[in-house]
């Protein structure tokens, strides 16, 4: 049974599917808690601040992206908390997961083909290679 579940999200449909799977892992145990982690990417942060007008508005936009993920976990009736981190998504997720000693990490995947993954890389691939805990990739 997994008690400490890390759910890495980016606000996409893939994140919602991952949230549903994290909810299944946590369901049935009152001791389980899902920690939702959203990484504000440094590469996009300046642009986001310029377009949002204020950091408070930007925080609201980020929380809005997380709303479907939170709803999926609320529907599964599991305990969860939200952490918004700053950095490059892959390394930031791995550092947080390893430092906090989660039992499992759940992350969505865009389903890139081999060539796309080789050229572009993927956050889920980077996480699988470097995380100390088991990783569940949801397609």
Image: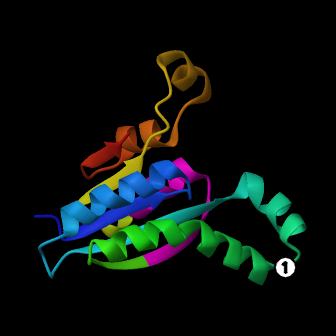
Q: Residue furthest front?
A: 75
Q: Quadrant of the C terminus?
A: top left
In percent of width and height, residue 138 lies at 35, 44
Residue 89 forms part of the magenta stretch: yes
**What is the number of callouts on the image?**
1
Query: Where is residue 56 shown, x and y percent of the image?
Result: 76, 83
Residue at 57%, 22% (x, y): give it: 116
Query: What range is drawn magenta here?
Result: 82-98
Q: Residues within 10 Å of mark 1 (few under 14, many from 20)?
A: few
Q: For the point 22% across and 61% down, which residue is it?
A: 24
Relative to 13, does residue 74 appear above or below in the rendering?
Answer: below
Q: Residue at x 37, y 38 (%)?
A: 129
Horizontally, is 70 left or right of 56 in the view? left
- Relative to 114, does residue 37 appear above or below in the rendering? below
Circle 1 sits on which residue?
54
The percent position of residue 118, horizontal first and vertical second, equals 54, 21
Q: Is residue 137 above or below residue 28?
A: above
The N terminus, quarter of image = bottom left
In this rendering, position of residue 6 left or right of residue 25:
right
In reply to whether residue 119 is colored magenta, the answer given is no
Tell me the residue at 49%/58% (across/down): 9
Q: Is residue 69 at all visible to an observer of this figure?
A: yes
Residue 34 appears in which quarter of the rendering?
bottom left
Determine the secondary structure under disc 1.
loop
The reply, left or right, for residue 40 in relation to residue 124 is right
4 or 74: nearer the eye? 74
**Image location (x, y in percent) of residue 111:** 46, 32
Is residue 102 among the parts visible in the rendering?
no
């Amino acid at each position: 049974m997994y008690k400490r579940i890390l759910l890495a999200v980016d606000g996409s449909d893939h994140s919602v599917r991952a949230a549903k799977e994290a909810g299944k892992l946590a369901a049935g145990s009152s001791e389980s808690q899902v920690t939702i982690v959203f990484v504000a990417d440094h590469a996009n942060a300046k642009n986001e601040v310029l377009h949002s007008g204020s950091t408070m508005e930007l925080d609201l936009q980020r929380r809005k992206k997380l709303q479907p993920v939170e709803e999926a976990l609320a529907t599964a009736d599991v305990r969860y908390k939200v952490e918004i981190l700053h950095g490059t998504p892959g390394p930031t997720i791995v550092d947080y997961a390893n430092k906090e000693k989660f039992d499992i990490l759940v992350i969505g995947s865009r389903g890139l083909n081999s060539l796309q993954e080789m050229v572009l890389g993927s956050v889920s691939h980077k996480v699988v290679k470097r995380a100390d805990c088991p990783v569940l990739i949801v397609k």
